[in-house]
Image: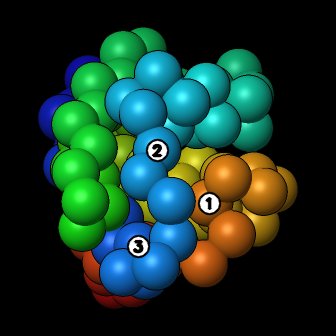
Amino acid sequence: MHLVEFAFAKPPRAPELSSDALLAALWAVCGPDDGLEHVRVHTSRAGARGAVFVLAASEASAVRQCRAVCLRALAVSAALGDWRLTYPTEA
């Protein structure tokens, strides 16, 4: 199991989002192959930071899995409309 940190930035004029809403958006796009075991997030006026525990063969694979889930949440969730993933960056 690997611990992977992530961060989102939101535009200044976008409405703030609760941690629960962000967690729901992330879990909504997770599937069994993503390997996510646990997710924690903290939202702020600037966006959000968080960490996931991921079942993966390697650290690099865990980072890719985390990034994929975050990008899917951005693509699917209306609440995350103009938000962007700032970390982890593409390898």
The residue at 42%/33% (across/down) is 18
Q: CA distance from mark 1 to mark 3?
A: 8 Å
Mark 2 vs 3: CB contact within 8 A: yes
Mark 1 vs 3: CB contact within 8 A: no
Q: Is 32 left or right of 36, judged from the image as shown?
A: right
- In front of the other: 16 or 6: 16
Number of other residues with Cα within 10 Å of mark 2, as a class: few under 14, some 14 to 19, many 20 or more = some
Q: Is 79 left or right of 87, judged from the image as shown?
A: right
Mark 1 vs 2: CB contact within 8 A: yes
Q: Earlier in the sequence, mark 1 or mark 2?
A: 2
Say which residue label 2 marks.
17
Q: Which three-letter amino acid code belongs to the residue tagged 1? A: Leu
Residue 6 visible in the snapshot: no
Number of other residues with Cα within 10 Å of mark 3, as a class: few under 14, some 14 to 19, many 20 or more = many
Q: CA distance from mark 1 to mark 2?
A: 8 Å
Q: CA distance from mark 2 to mark 3?
A: 10 Å
Q: Position of residue 32 (x, y in %)?
A: 71, 21
Quarter-of-image position of residue 11: bottom left
The residue at 55%/30% (across/down) is 21
Q: Which three-letter amino acid code belongs to the residue tagged 3? A: Lys
Check residue 10 in the rendering and tell me which mark sits there, or answer none. Answer: 3
Say which residue label 1 marks.
80
